[in-house]
Image: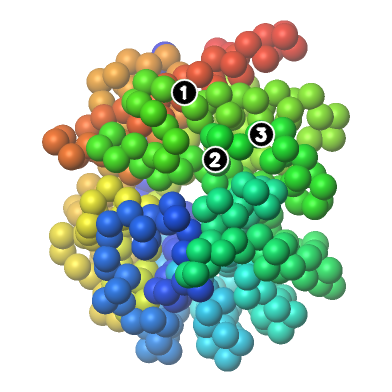
Amino acid sequence: MDVDITKCSELDTILIKVASRCNINCKYCYVYNMGDDNWSRMAKFISKETVDSICLSLKKLVLYQEKVFSIVLHGGEPFLLGPLRLEYLLRQLRNAIPSDYPISIQTNGVLISDELLDICSSYHVSVAVSIDGPQKTHDKFRVNHKGAGTFNEVLKGIEKLKKHPDSLFLNAGLLAVIDPLSNPGEVYDFFKEIKASSVDFLYKDGNHTNLPINKSSIDSTEYGEWMTKLLEVYMDDENPLPIRVLDDMLKVLLGGIVSKEGMGITDFGIIIIDTDGTIMKNDTLKSSFNGADKFEQQSNIKEDKLIDFLNSPEFEQYREMQRPANSKCLKCPVLNICGGGMILHRWRQDNDFDNPSVYCADQLYLINNMLSKLSQFNLQYE
């Protein structure tokens, strides 16, 4: 299959690190537990000066590109900001960009309160919560700084989110990291039981040098098998729970376009702004090696040169990293579905990112099972 990989100079997502510390300590976290230590030198919270500089640049970006971009507030844990800092940040952001530009917060859910949700509602900011499944699955990895599970606290936060008067908008769904040793059916049933609006499943971070947790080898398919079992439960459900990763893959198989980075042949323009205003690459690259998310020529949003930076050769080189370059990927007949996977999953110590995804075997296993399922419905992939 011929694949047309096109260039795009626009931003899709600006992820703002508003807090560099976290109130819990997930064992698989790429920020704190995979070797990168940049967080320890960052300001604990984003300052008013940095917020104002970001908003000045965003005003100019709105005029510069026609395409609507999204803003994601991230951490650490963004709700560590507290109500006063959060209200200032959201007020300034909403004054800087049009009302139809989406702003969302990714939280671990522990600190969700009615007061914080009221502030988010006032500025039309949605909230997505990370929870990995039922208690025995979630508490295996998502623990506090004393090693105790956080499930009960997160579930309380989710219930507050669901009961808020503006929950129909505020509730942006759940994010779950896969444990291939868990039972996919039990995980799916749990999310149905708590009436999740949607769930997005992620593979654990890892690469060819440091394999993801519970992946035994490059050629093993633990994650692909888990996802295939999830697919079977999902497709057998007459009223299925929206699962973006499965929805997107099936959409591509049927000729559609994906909405998720690291899947399909689509460029996603993503930058990170750290708490001190430094412009960074996708922060998941931290899991590759210490400093992998840094640009060689450091830029800071306080210098008000965001648009110049987006037009720089270094930014274009960063964008090109998303595009699959390894010969195995380029010859693959289903490249347009997985897109070569996430950049961080391609890294190997001796040759950097010139590799297929560490999840290549898993993705092929899942895709082949998807094709088999679609054939049962007389739907063909072209």
Residue 179 horizontal side relative to residue 376, left or right? left
Residue visible at 65% across and 49% down?
136
Note whether 52 is above or below 208 in the view shown: below
Quadrant where the C terminus is found in the figure: top right
Foreground pick, 254 / 120: 120
Residue visible at 72% across and 9% down?
376
Badge 3: how crowded within 10 Å, few (<14), some, or many (20+)?
many
Give how far across and how far down residue 60 sits, in percent: 41, 73
Image-quadrant location for residue 380: top right
Q: Earlier in the sequence, mark 3 or mark 2?
A: 2
**The disc labelled 1 sits on which kind of residue?**
Thr
Foreground pick, 353 / 160: 160
Residue 322 horizontal side relative to residue 129, left or right? left
Q: Secondary structure at mark 1?
A: loop
**The disc labelled 3 sits on which kind of residue?**
Pro
The label on residue 184 is 3
Q: CA distance from mark 1 to mark 2?
A: 13 Å
Give how far across and how far down residue 92 sits, in percent: 53, 84
Q: CA distance from mark 3 to mark 2?
A: 9 Å
For label 1, the residue is 221
**The disc labelled 2 sits on which kind of residue?**
Asp
